[in-house]
Amino acid sequence: EADIYQTPRYLVIGTGKKITLECSQTMGHDKMYWYQQDPGMELHLIHYSYGVNSTEKGDLSSESTVSRIRTEHFPLTLESARPSHTSQYLCASSEGTGGNTGELFFGEGSRLTVL
Amino acid sequence: AQTVTQSQPEMSVQEAETVTLSCTYDTSENNYYLFWYKQPPSRQMILVIRQEAYKQQNATENRFSVNFQKAAKSFSLKISDSQLGDTAMYFCAFMRNNAGNMLTFGGGTRLMVKP
């Protein structure tokens, strides 16, 4: 099992609430990613980070924001949740230097439902 | 831009039999990597197998092997002696060389292994 953890695993909230999905890894990986997995299970990269104080937007436009203040921590925040944000969010990490293996280590996911 | 297509949304196989999952991709790159990832129900996604495009020999990992046809841009996964624990979503993924572990995923194939 990979050492990458996501909380909460499940979250049901009302429209307009602010939420933060937590992601932590203990492998010392420089690179971290957030993927959105829609009901059809397709994965879309929404944010990534190559290290502390580095964040970039992914292929899929998202209203969420991320921060990377510590190597091990990469939280995702939605300031005002809407039903269209209902999805599963997967966090992943990979090695930095020489990290061209394509091996991502995934968390178990956070399933968000916005009513 | 790269695209990855998995044309089989769902498949099933009897325990102990062999199943092949299909994947095609489109790219103008010559150097790249291809992957199969497995996402068991409610568990972390993990890397199953990796293929470097410059290698002609097909990758093999125990019961998992690939059929890589570079000219046809095809990358299928064969699972031999299927086990109940193989039940999962399987994602094909593409990565350009030196792309810093930025993967493009296919839409996934849901595999059910029946006893």
Image (cartoon, coloured by chain):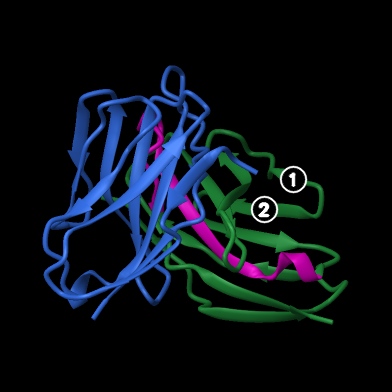
Chain colours: A blue, B green
Numbered tag placed on residue B66 in the rendering: 2
Q: Amino acid at mark 1?
A: Thr
Residue type pointed to by label 2: Val
| Front position in the image: A114 or A57 | A114
Give percent across and percent down for residue A50: 30, 27
Tell me the element at label 1.
strand
The foreground one among B20 and A7 is A7
Answer yes or no: is residue B69 visible: no
Q: Residue at x 54, y 33 (%)?
A: B54
**In the rendered picture of this protein, how many numbered marks are placed on residues?**
2
Q: Chain of mark 1?
A: B
Q: Secondary structure at mark 2?
A: strand
Coordinates of residue B11 in the picture (x, y in percent): 63, 80
Looking at the rendering, the stretch of residues picked out in magenta corresponds to: B84-104
Vertical arrangement, residue A9 with respect to residue B94, above or below: below
Q: Are marks 1 and 2 on the same chain?
A: yes
Q: Is residue B81 left or right of residue A82?
A: right
**Dividing the picture into quarters, in which one does residue B56 lie?**
top right
Instruction: Residue B112: say if magenta.
Output: no
Dot 1: few (<14), some (14–19), or many (≥20) neighbours within 10 Å?
A: some
Residue at 32% of width from left, 45% of height from top?
B28
Spot occupied by residue B66 in the image (x, y as percentages of width and height): 67, 53
Q: Is residue A20 left or right of residue A88?
A: left
CA distance for labels 1 and 2? 7 Å
Chain letter for the residue marked with disc 2 in the picture: B
Q: Are marks 1 and 2 in contact (CB under 8 Å)?
A: yes
Image quadrant where residue A88 sits: bottom left
What residue is shown with label 1?
B60
Q: Position of residue B1 (x, y in %)?
A: 25, 50
Tell me which label, 1 or 2, sits earlier in the chain. 1
